[in-house]
Amino acid sequence: MKTLTVIKHPLTLVIILIIIAECFVVQNFYTPVVGVFFGIVAVVHIILGYFLKKQCSACTQANPIQPIAEPTVNNLEEQLKAAQQQLITQEKMASIGMLTAGIAHEIKNPLNFVNNFSDMTVELVEELKEEIAKSENITDAQKESIDGIVEDIGTNCKKINEHGKRAESIIKNMLIQTRASNVDKIPVDMNQLLEEYLNLAYHGLRAQNNKFNAKMEKQLDATLPKITASPQSIGRVFLNIINNGLYAANKKSEQFSAELLNTIFMPTISISSSQDNDNIIIKIKDNGNGIKEDVITKIFEPFFTTKPAGEGTGLGLPICYDIVTKEHGGKLDVVSNVGEFTEFIITLPKDKA
């Protein structure tokens, strides 16, 4: 069997064919010398071929050739479906952004009228008070009654103006979120921006669920310097992380009855700011159920979400990560203890002198 295997070697086959041909050619004038010569050559070549085959076999065993994995039809189909779903999600988000911008613009104009006229009414109330005080045809009792009514009107107008300004701030931020992210960077007070988006996120959740209540804790470094950044982009990061924190704390609060809530457990969101020589550090912490260690490694991956189907797109944190790391050269880390808390740590470089 080994000899037959060696015969497969091209040169061996050629020599054997030459021997056979020589036998036919010289059959009339056969010389033993020629026959012996060709026979020796053939035997030597067969022996050499046998040893070469053994050597090649040993080399192949020592360094086996790895088969090249080719993509299967199923894998290609799965990749195609994932890409298709990603395009659908992006299209939905773009449509939602356009709708949000349109609604915000439509609300902004009537809201401006509300704010302006409430401002004017407060001024008119003050003038009315002065005129009433000057009048001599009104008794003191009537003045007191009229003053009470006018005071209530003034208070109501101030409340209308106060909440109108808050609504105006919300609409302004909605418009900012729908604009392109390639905005110019300006010096930003991170403490002010952080507080603004904390209030925006909290009141946004309260608008969806008026039964929800949370404690807000602040530990802000008053000496924090301004840094050059995009307030729209960083605001988006703050808003997303705070929204996630409030969501987690709210979900944990649902485990307690109304009687025990606020006594055993109080949903809490904490913000803090500090600095070192080169960076400012923003921390946003919630007391929700926390994130498991095997999940933490995936939360910055696109389309990965811990929320139930339909409640999260899995794009918020990846976008935040890109804004912090790529747009601003910072770091975004997360620390969590299951059942106790989750804390996001945003590190942004200070401006170089």
Image (tube, helix red, strand yellow):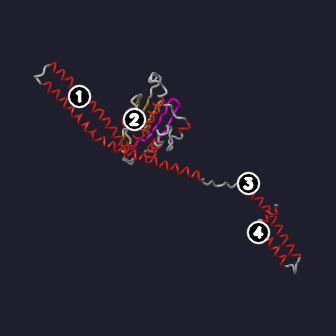
Find residue 228 and report its horizontal and vertical position in percent: 38, 43
Q: How far is mark 2 from mark 1, CA to CA?
A: 29 Å
Marks 3 and 1, how far apart in space? Answer: 94 Å
Q: Which of marks 2 and 3 precedes in the sequence?
A: 3
Q: Mark 1 = which residue?
A: 154
Helix, strand or loop under label 4: helix
Classify 107 as above or below 10: above
Q: Is residue 22 left or right of residue 344?
A: right
Nearer to us of marks 4 and 2 is 2
Principal secondary structure, stretch drawn in magenta: strand
Image point (84%, 77%), residue name: 24
Q: Which residue is mark 3?
A: 61
Residue 347 on the magenta segment:
yes
Looking at the rendered image, the quarter that the N terminus falls into is bottom right
Spatial CA distance of label 1 from label 4 is 111 Å
Front position in the image: 229 or 344: 344
What residue is disc 4 on? Answer: 11
Distance between mark 4 and mark 2 Cα atoms? 82 Å
Q: Give the residue type that dot 4 points to.
A: Leu
Percent coordinates x, y for residue 48 in the rendering: 80, 64
